[in-house]
């Protein structure tokens, strides 16, 4: 096969700019593999990139799709593994919304035992983001309390499970409805907080006897930032991975000094290839066994054919989903 289907979004905008096009199958470069895509995960950064507010880093593939599952069909120079014919999941530099995509061989991971290709497509971008920010930058440890915003999102449902694995003493999360709260409880959250009717700052203060949480994993920003400074315990950490309510905020930073708070954040896509490879290996050593034992599982809300990518983006924009949304490319 010399041509393939791919989703194009140029010049960018709302979901009407998404269209299925035909183009030449890419060739694996040095250190890369060519993957026949089975499924592709849909992530919030895809929506931001489509809208023109989150462009691909210099030198990265400019197309949508950051995580896939599928079969390795060709090697670039210098690649010995994964083997041709092996089923894997992979973090891609972009272009995962297609029949074929290239990715660095070191960003490919074997399927955990018992995990389907459909489920595996939900792991690379999402789980690597959670690992890098909750465990590495956030330093979550057993016996600590954590607040995870957006608990019913793909990131949120994954972070709850990883926090449970890390031995968090109390897992708080914000959600928009009772059904989302119930889903988060089933995954391991101790106290889902209905942000439309409850104040997470007040709830956490009451339920921790005023001590607060050791870590906040935030994807909201905006007016939540001031509350985070108040809700964090002494020597607490705040990790930002997105600013859905805006990044331009005015804060009184005094609690940062008084409580000795650490404020940090990161994005995955801008990291070096070597850093991504290191995170992928760390995940395989720590979380892959948990997935194989059934102690963790991607929560999938909906699946769409590749041609219906606009419906997938519309669902994510509606925030009505609980867990991950995937594209069925080559089942």
Image (spheres, helix red, strand yellow):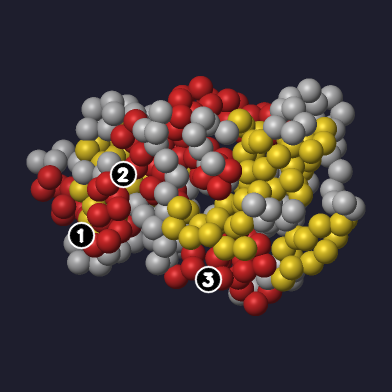
SS category of the residue bearing label 1: loop
Position of 40 compared to 253: left or right? right
Residue drawn at x 58%, y 25% is 281
Q: Earlier in the sequence, mark 2 or mark 3?
A: 2
In which quadrant of the rendered view does residue 277 lie?
Answer: top right
The correct choice, above or below, for 309 with respect to 64 in the image is below
Location of residue 51 in the rendering, given as x and y in whole percent from the top left corner: 62, 68
Please report whichever mark, 3 or 1, sits nearer to the chain's N-terminal start.
1
| Residue 199: numbered disc | 1
On screen, residue 13 above or below 26: below
* 189 on left or right of 270: left
Could you give the CA–CA distance between mark 2 and mark 3, rounded to whole angstroms? 25 Å
User: Which residue is drawn at the image coordinates 76% and 49% (left, top)?
Assistant: 100
Q: Identify the residue at image location x=42%, y=62%.
A: 321
Q: Are marks 2 and 3 in contact (CB under 8 Å)?
A: no
Query: As rendered, which of 17 and 298 lies closer to the eye?
Result: 298
Q: Is residue 281 left or right of residue 301?
A: right
Upstream in the sequence, badge 2 or badge 1? 2
- Left or right position of 13 against 299: right
In the image as oriented, which residue stretches furthest toward the bottom?
16
Identify the element where label 2 is drawn.
helix
Q: Which mark is residue 314?
A: 3
Locate residue 136, reporting x and y percent: 45, 30
Residue where numbered disc 2 is placed: 187
What is the quadrant of residue 278 in the picture? Answer: top right
């Amino acid at each position: 096969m010399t041509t393939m289907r791919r989703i194009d979004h140029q010049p960018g905008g709302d979901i009407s700019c998404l269209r299925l096009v035909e183009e030449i199958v890419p060739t694996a470069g040095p250190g890369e593999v060519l993957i026949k895509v089975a499924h592709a995960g849909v992530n919030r950064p895809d929506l931001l990139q489509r809208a023109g507010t989150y462009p691909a880093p210099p030198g990265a593939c400019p197309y949508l799709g950051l995580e896939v599952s599928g079969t390795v069909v060709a090697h670039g120079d210098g690649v010995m593994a994964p083997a041709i014919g092996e089923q894997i999941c992979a973090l891609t530099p972009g272009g995962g919304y297609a029949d074929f995509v290239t990715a660095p061989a070191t960003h490919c991971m074997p399927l955990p035992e018992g995990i389907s290709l459909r489920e595996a497509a939900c792991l690379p971008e999402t789980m690597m983001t959670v690992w890098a920010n909750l465990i590495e930058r956030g330093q979550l440890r057993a016996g600590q309390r954590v607040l995870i915003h957006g608990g019913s999102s793909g990131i949120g449902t994954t972070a709850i499970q990883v926090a449970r694995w890390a031995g968090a003493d109390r897992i708080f999360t914000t959600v928009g409805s009772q059904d989302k709260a119930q889903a988060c409880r089933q995954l391991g959250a101790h106290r889902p907080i209905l942000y439309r009717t409850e104040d997470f700052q007040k709830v956490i203060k009451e339920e921790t006897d005023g001590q607060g949480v050791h870590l906040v994993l935030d994807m909201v920003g905006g007016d939540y930032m001031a509350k985070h400074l108040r809700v964090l315990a002494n020597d607490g950490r705040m990790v930002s991975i997105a600013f859905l309510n805006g990044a331009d905020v005015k804060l009184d930073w005094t609690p940062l000094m008084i409580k000795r708070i650490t404020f940090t954040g990161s994005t995955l896509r801008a990291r070096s290839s070597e850093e991504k490879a290191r995170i992928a290996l760390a995940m395989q050593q720590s979380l892959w066994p948990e997935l194989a034992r059934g102690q963790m599982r991607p929560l999938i809300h909906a699946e769409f054919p590749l041609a219906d990518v606009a419906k997938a983006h519309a669902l994510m924009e509606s925030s009505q989903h609980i867990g991950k949304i995937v594209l069925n490319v080559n089942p």
